[in-house]
Amino acid sequence: MIIGGDAAGMSAASQARRLRGRGELDVVAFERGHFTSYSACGIPYWVGGDVDGPDRLIARTPEEHRERGIDLRLRTEVAQLDLDRGRVRVRDLESGAESWEGYDKLVIATGARPVRPPLPGIDAAGVHGVQTLDDGQALLDTLTGLNGGPERRAVVVGAGYIGVEMAEALLTRGYEVTVLNRGEQPMSTLDPDMGRLVREAMDGLGITTVGGADVTGILTGDGGRVRAVATEDGEYPADVVALGMGVEPETTLAREAGLPVGEYGGLLTDLSMRVRGREEVWAGGDCVEVLDLVSGRERHIPLGTHANKHGQVIGSNVAGGYGTFPGVVGTAVSKVCSLEIARTGLREKDAEAVGLRFVTVTVESTSRAGYYPGAAPMTVKMLAERRTGRLLGCQIVGREGAAKRVDIAAVALTAGMTVEQITALDLGYAPPFSPVWDPVQVAARKAVAAVRNAGA
């Protein structure tokens, strides 16, 4: 039995079905929404008009899952877990009917929910979170319904990945966009000096970014629709508001059932993705915490890449096979218009929090050989452990060709490489693709010198 019909849940269902036929294993999945197996990461690009949706964002439809022998029930919510009796209470969201359903093995893949603080007016018409395809459709319906006057104003609350991507989407649709961010710089997943580069680029695009903005409420006008967002320092007029304040694990059911959760509210599992202390319960996706291979601590990192891998591991294990999920290094990429943003490993404050001593270096380079047409600038920041030179983290901000270079650092982090070893990597080179020293290796060379100069 699987609770949740997106990446982790349906990957687990599909993998279990691959390993065990219909006569060997019954697979039932409950999903409270209208869609399954979709890319939530693609919603901002659907809203912005870059991608037709929602069909283009769906990897596998409910009908396709059912054809493969999965009993998938849409618009069905699990309201309660009874772990002692091995059953769940389900509710049909269309009819309201409830029933108890039994299981032998349970997979919790309830995902994450957008952070929605209890502010006055937060539920007003025109205020939207962006987490599911239903959310994306609701936002598009609002945009379609607005009058197409010359001053269409959008406010995005929060400047993380979703906030920055939604700012681009709304700018593309012709809105005057203001981003309100509690921190001084956008993208708190970066160090502030790298976040400043993102802010400068957003300002250059015509997006107004307000740092240190503590939102106090949503102001409404005629018919209860949003008219402005209020902060401690003023009001920002808005025809539509997008919430981009991040997400938190959706573990309400699990908490009520007494299952273990960590510091960030996510379920705690072992390497097989089995919930700790429960032989018959697994969990994966955005509702769990995972091991950070660099810091050695549990973290909540809600990404579809992880969720699909969790599902593969869970599906193998519930079907009698074997799989493990070793952990992550925290790699993520994003963009705002032509600016690419990437990070992996630890930020400065992450390294400090776990007691690591480190050096940092920042270099300016280009995406191609400087003389080759189209060479674009990029900034690479690297953290390395003092004395050992072990790579601890890497952040990249630049134009075309910048973001995916972070994968070099992600592999190096996973392998536990030093910055000196990175300088010796045999990376591909030709003037249209890279300078003779790749920007990541340029940063590594500078980090080697910094480590030597820092001593013990």
Image (cartoon, rainbow, N blue to C red):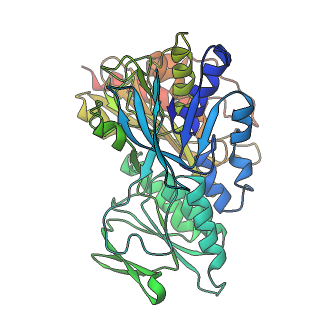
Residue 148 in percent (x, y) is at 66, 84
Camera-side residue: 42 or 320?
Answer: 320
Write down the quadrant of residue 261 in the picture: top left
Say which residue appears at 30% left-offset and 35% top-offset.
257
In which quadrant is the C terminus drawn?
A: top left
Residue 414 falls left or right of residue 229: right
Residue 27 falls left or right of residue 412: right
Outermost residue, bottom direction?
222
Write down the quadrant of residue 146 in the picture: bottom right
Say which residue appears at 59% left-offset and 85% top-offset.
151
| Residue 313 in sight in this render | yes
Look at the picture and state if 403 lies above or below 222.
above
Look at the picture and state if 24 lies above or below 208.
above
Residue 14 in percent (x, y) is at 64, 26
Outermost residue, top direction?
321
Look at the picture and state if 301 lies above or below 171.
above
Camera-side residue: 325 or 322?
Answer: 322
Write down the quadrant of residue 45 in the picture: bottom right
Say which residue appears at 54% left-offset and 32% top-offset.
8
